[in-house]
Amino acid sequence: MKALDDLLAPATQWLNTLDQREKYIVIGGAISLAIMLFYLIIWEPITSQYEQQKLHLDSQRQLYSWMKNASAEIRSLKSTGGNNIAKYRNQSIASLADRSAITSGIKSYIEKIDQSKKGVKVNIKAANFDQIITWLTNLENKYGIIASKVKVETTKTKGAVDAQITLERTS
């Protein structure tokens, strides 16, 4: 306590030299300064950080909720998709490829479908590249048939390609 008294002694002596009205102004200013410093150094950073953490927590909760719903949807789609693939397991790759080619719009571009030991070889002439990709994606997602070998060559027509594709079932 004595150290504090020694530290404040010069300020007290100076304050005693002031008029009563000046003392009130100086003390009021000191109190205002103390309140302002408390707010700026302690209160405002704490409340600001609290609000940021609250917003972050809300966004994390929303993300968790979305992920939980998406997870349930993925499980549902996987189980549905797996059943569809199993349903088509006994059908030939050639017939499934032909059926899928009709729905994808590339049936007219298929020159030949040959059965081989490893699967089915499909020759496609002057087909739209995007349609071929859509067809292959459909084969994989719906029937569990993948393209194990793909050879694509450009044609003179823009966007059209010739392709030799070997199709196989996934394990």
Image (cartoon, helix red, strand yellow):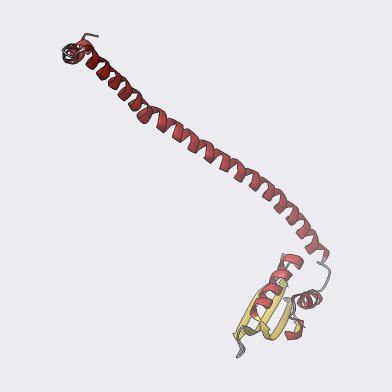
* Frontmost residue, 43 versus 74: 43
Residue 36 to residue 70: above or below: above
The image position of residue 96, as x and y in percent, is 79, 74
Residue 89 to residue 48: above or below: below
Inspect this view and state whether residue 42 appears. yes
Image quarter hosting the N terminus: top left
Q: Quadrant of residue 47?
A: top left
At 38% across and 27% down in the image, what residue appears? 39
Inspect this view and state whether residue 112 appears. no
Image quarter hosting the C terminus: bottom right
* Frontmost residue, 59 versus 136: 59
Residue 62 to residue 14: above or below: below
Q: Number of marks in the image?
A: 0
Left or right of 97 on screen, residue 4? left
The image position of residue 61, as x and y in percent, is 60, 40
At 76% across and 66% down in the image, what residue appears? 142
Residue 39 to residue 103: above or below: above
Q: In which quarter of the image is residue 147?
A: bottom right
Left or right of 15 on screen, residue 36? right
The image position of residue 136, as x and y in percent, is 69, 73
Left or right of 137 on screen, residue 43? left
At 82% across and 67% down in the image, what residue appears? 88
Left or right of 12 on screen, residue 47? right
Q: Quadrant of residue 117?
A: bottom right
Name of the residue lying farthest toward the bottom: 156
